[in-house]
Amino acid sequence: MRILPVAAVVVTVLDALAKRRRLAGLPVLPLVPRQRTGKSEVDGRGSALRMVRAKGVVVDQVTEVAARELAGRDGLSVVNLVPRDLPTARVLDLLHEVDPRTYRQDRQAKGHGGGHAVLAEEQLLRKVGLPQRGAPSGVELAKAEKELKPHAAARTQVVLAPRLWSSPAVLAEDAEVLRVRHGSRIGPDAATVLTIPALIVASGLFSPGWAFLALAAWSAHPLMVLAGNRHLKPADLWSYSLLRLVREPKRLVAALRAEAAHRAGGEDPVQRRRAEYQADIAAGLDRFFEPERADCPWCRGTELKVRLRTSDLNQGKPGEFKVDECRSCGHIFTNPQPTAEGLGFYYRDAYDGLNEDMVQGIFATRRGYFQPQAETVRPHITPGKWLDVGTGHGHFCNAAKEIWPDTDFHGLDMSDGIEIAERRGWVERGYRGMFVDLAPSMPDRYDVVSMFHYLEHSKDPQLELEAATKVLRPGGYLLIDVPDPACRWAKLLGKWWSIWLQPQHLHFFPVQNLRERLSELGYTVVLEQHAEAHQPADLLIATWTALRAVAPERDVPWRPEPPSTLSRIARGATFAAGTPLMAAGVLADVALKDVAEKYGLCNSYRLLARKD
């Protein structure tokens, strides 16, 4: 039990140092602008900038002119202004989400700001729904800040305005603002924030001295971050630090209550969906599956063995799934396969709807994974046109623009995410529908076609490969990432290996099978990578999945009733107790990353093939 408070101290200090470093990189508007004029600056695209102030906020002329000069000088479309006395809790929120040193160039970064004033292009303000007249509320401005960054991915900056002061009217909406910024993640995020103090308090029963030290360090965390800063001066810094154990939970509880009130007001997305889900379940799940196959969909061999039996461990939707392996070629597949209606049922609210905020939050942190994917083709081709199949909301295309700024990225997906990607400018053109159906209408167009963890989701992967062949120009490249069924974690973790992801992952390809099929289609495989395609999170996600199985999802519409108060408490306690296990999983995943290929622990592989 002594380990917990010691670890809490280490984590707290390291986090404070990281946030203090971020704070040091926050740009500061000059107190006296170079040009003393109120004229509007207009950028090279001819779009006027407009200052939007939340109710009760006053932006003086010096601040506005300085912001306009910054936008004109740096080619910015959005400037988020942070008041110098922004309360401590909001500052910590901002520094958690925003690294000012990389915020502008990080096209994946979340939209966040000071919540008081924004200078932005008129056309962007219209896109995010801010009125041309009248001051928005703090909640409305927070919603706009969240969306402005994705719409101006590489033209947004957060800056400190030393002459701007917080508005009591805006601060009074703190709980609603917190709810809006976290979206459907508010519950899990609140639990995560409170895990460390909860563990510290619990460890006090066994090691009070160390627990007191850890609690003192956690309470002093805001002082470690903000003390001595010349420009940012929260009025409540000392009081918030001294009373952090009370004020932080109180703030999060207020946000949770705001979320509950929001749902009770007739806007509860879970309750709206519950009747539809329950009707689907009551009609029987058998209709969601095709007849069981007696042969392998890859080689037509008839010698099959059961590799896995499992349930939906990702969402917890009802149903049991069997995964078979072909003894002839080693291909692994879900058997029986879901029908189109079944896939609709199991995909619903998995990547959009109820889980959209969470999934998009995860993808937003994967810039360091997407960019090496984009770099893969560099020694072989300078792409003019690139099609990303199964692009979702276009996160890969958005990140890849940093690597290939002159490339036209197109995206294809079944969901409305592709339409969102097109509106944001993350893809130049979006196609919504089935790749196999759309491919004949666009032959020989692309220099690169990418399929990142797409092929395993498809009903007929061989038809998908043929579709890619149709749309690639001669000499173009097909870039594929898929799970590796030869990964040792598949056997060591069994059904808890997250890559099985039933019933979404329908096919698993031994690398030799995929290489041979590409050769038959007229490709030359020029690159095979394992370590580079590995995503080191097997033990973390296995632990997380097991904890979810012990303490099921909080409130989901495929369960007939919302969870009781007791079950909510039990879920929170389970995840709090499991936090050290998840931390150990993270450390083990990181430690094994560099030796994953040597010991056969890579969970994915990557192939780059040239169409000859």
Image: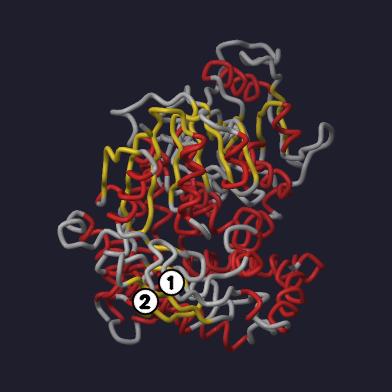
Q: What residue is at 51 percent from the left and 35 percent from the top?
A: 471
Can residue 293 be seen in this snapshot?
A: yes
The structure's colour scheme is: secondary structure
Other residues around mark 2 within 10 Å, as few (<14) / some (14–19) / many (≥20) = some
- Residue 588's place in the image compared with 91, above or below, is below
Secondary structure beneath label 2 = strand
Q: Residue beneath label 1, please? A: 295
Q: Which of the 4 image quarters holds residue 118?
A: top right
Residue pictured at 51% horizontal, 59% vertical: 240
Which quadrant is home to the N terminus? bottom left
Structural distance between the alpha carbons of marks 1 and 2: 7 Å
Q: Nearer the viewer, residue 285 or 230?
A: 285
Check if mark 1's residue and mark 2's residue have beta carbons within 8 Å: yes
Q: Residue furthest right?
A: 133
Count of numbered badges drawn on the protein: 2
Amino acid at pointer 2? Leu
Can residue 254 be seen from the camera position used here? no
For residue 172, side relative to residue 491 (left or right): right
In the rendered image, which quarter contains the C terminus?
Answer: top left
The spot of residue 4 in percent (x, y) is 30, 74
Picture coordinates of residue 581, whole percent (x, y): 32, 75
